[in-house]
């Protein structure tokens, strides 16, 4: 008869990477059911204050800092029949009202452009936006003041450089949201599908503080949203998941509960915020800064700097502080950590608070680049899981690196391939890496038997 082995000396059961991949596959199927709605929300953000009252298409023409008036714009339907035609006003702005929602072609008449002004991309004379009821969709054409530059356009290397900067920014935002997801999984083994709504919660809270309520400057509104995001994470842990663990609820049952919790929270956010996308009042229109072949706005530079600073602070927290070392100990082995005197409940609560705060911050940054929508966190959830699994399950540093890889892949792929498929290539990279390194980039091999 085998001798009794104390619980804290038993080998921890390895978490199955295949199980996590299966969960992500389930989420892919869920996302496929809402892909049409998600694409419309992401590709056609509403930045026009008339959006709730008017159905139409709007845009503006400018070369450098100067507006370009009297440029003709023609709108045709899917059958090729002309719907309307207008010209830009003295400020370079134009607006065409549409009677019926649907997909339309917007074509700029290049012969009406002033001498010395041309499209930056001469082949992009037509855009095909989708118009929805009660919203004004933006269709923007980029102009260049130098005719030679307009004819040649950016080279492939220039486009790669620009896409890389966009990919780094997007990857840092995903990393911000995925770290909390990874830390929660590492300390509790829970795959939290409701994490997406924690991202949306932060963005919506900041919007109300910035636009509807006291109209705080966005940085102040973001700080309050981060605090409230941490409070939400702590309440979920103390009010729901800690009691479930104490009652011996299994991992699979808790996973199903997070799916249901995510659906409930998503509907609450829909009732609270509404179905339409709405922008923040700050940093909406900015002049770009040209750094070699790369054009970036001060807002995007700020997002990159704040994201990097936050990730560095999280790394220092994990490596240099006592609570960070305790978090890593709990992630490695809960029983041994508890037997060594670590208050595991307090550490798990701190992880949930930190994860909620980071998710809220990531939601604010993502909404600042596009607009606020009640589905925005749900649309990022698949990429959060991809970054977490690609980097290595349960490791914060792995989530950072995996998310950067996902962000770069999605944006750089648009240089050669359709932007509508950019998330597909991110998942392709995930599959390729896992084929050669199943534990992820920074994951550690574990014995199964």
Image: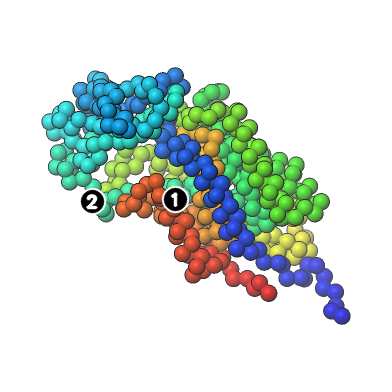
Left or right side of 54 for 239: right
Q: Residue furthest left?
A: 115
Q: Earlier in the sequence, mark 2 or mark 1?
A: 2
SS category of the residue bearing label 2:
loop
Report the residue at 55% width, 33% height from top.
204
Where does label 1 land, which residue?
423
Residue 405 in the image: x percent, y percent?
45, 57
Residue with the mark numbered 2: 155
Q: x, y (%) of residue 93?
A: 29, 24
Figure check: 187 above or below 239: below
Q: Is residue 146 above or below residue 112?
A: below
* Quadrant into which the N terminus falls: bottom right
Between 83 and 89, the one lying in front of the other is 83
Q: Secondary structure at mark 1?
A: helix
Where, quadrant-wise, is the C terminus in this rendering?
bottom right
**Where residue 65 appears, x then y in whole percent?**
25, 30
């Amino acid at each position: 008869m085998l001798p009794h082995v104390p619980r804290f000396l038993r080998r921890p059961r390895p978490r199955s990477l295949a199980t996590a991949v299966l969960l992500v596959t389930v989420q892919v199927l869920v996302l496929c059911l809402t892909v049409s709605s998600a694409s419309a929300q992401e590709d056609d953000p509403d930045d026009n204050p008339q959006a709730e009252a008017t159905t139409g298409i709007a845009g503006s023409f400018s070369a450098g800092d100067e507006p370009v008036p009297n440029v003709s714009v023609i709108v045709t339907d899917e059958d090729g029949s002309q719907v309307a035609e207008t010209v830009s006003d003295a400020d370079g702005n134009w607006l065409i009202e549409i009677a019926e929602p649907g997909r339309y072609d917007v074509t700029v008449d290049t012969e009406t452009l002033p001498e010395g002004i041309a499209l930056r991309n001469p082949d992009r004379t037509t855009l095909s936006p989708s118009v929805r009821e009660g919203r004004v969709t933006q269709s923007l054409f980029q102009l260049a003041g130098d005719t030679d530059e307009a004819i040649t356009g950016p080279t492939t290397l220039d486009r790669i450089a620009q896409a890389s900067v966009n990919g780094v920014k997007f990857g840092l935002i995903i990393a911000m949201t995925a770290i909390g997801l990874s830390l929660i999984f590492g300390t509790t083994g829970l795959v939290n599908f409701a994490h997406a709504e924690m991202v949306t919660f932060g963005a919506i809270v900041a919007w109300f503080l910035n636009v509807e309520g006291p109209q705080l400057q966005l940085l102040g509104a973001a700080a309050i949203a981060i605090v409230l995001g941490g409070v939400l994470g702590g309440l979920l842990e103390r009010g729901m998941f800690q009691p479930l663990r104490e009652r011996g609820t299994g991992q699979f049952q808790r996973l199903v509960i997070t799916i249901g919790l995510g659906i409930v929270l998503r509907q609450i956010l829909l009732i609270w915020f509404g179905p339409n996308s709405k922008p923040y009042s700050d940093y909406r229109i900015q002049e770009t800064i040209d750094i070699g072949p790369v054009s970036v706005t001060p807002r995007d530079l700020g997002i990159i700097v704040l994201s990097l600073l936050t990730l560095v602070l999280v790394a220092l927290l994990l490596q240099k502080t006592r609570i960070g070392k305790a978090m890593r100990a709990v992630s490695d082995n809960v029983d041994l950590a508890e037997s060594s005197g670590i208050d595991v409940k307090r550490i798990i609560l701190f992880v949930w608070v930190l994860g909620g705060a980071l998710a809220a911050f990531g939601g604010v940054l993502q909404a600042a680049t596009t607009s606020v929508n009640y589905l925005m966190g749900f649309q990022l959830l698949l990429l959060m899981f991809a970054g977490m699994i690609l980097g290595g399950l349960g490791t914060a540093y792995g989530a950072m690196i995996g998310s950067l890889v996902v962000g770069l892949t999605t944006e750089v792929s648009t240089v050669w391939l359709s932007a509508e498929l950019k998330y597909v290539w991110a998942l392709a990279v995930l599959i390729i890496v896992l084929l050669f390194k199943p534990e992820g980039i920074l994951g550690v091999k574990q014995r199964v038997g």
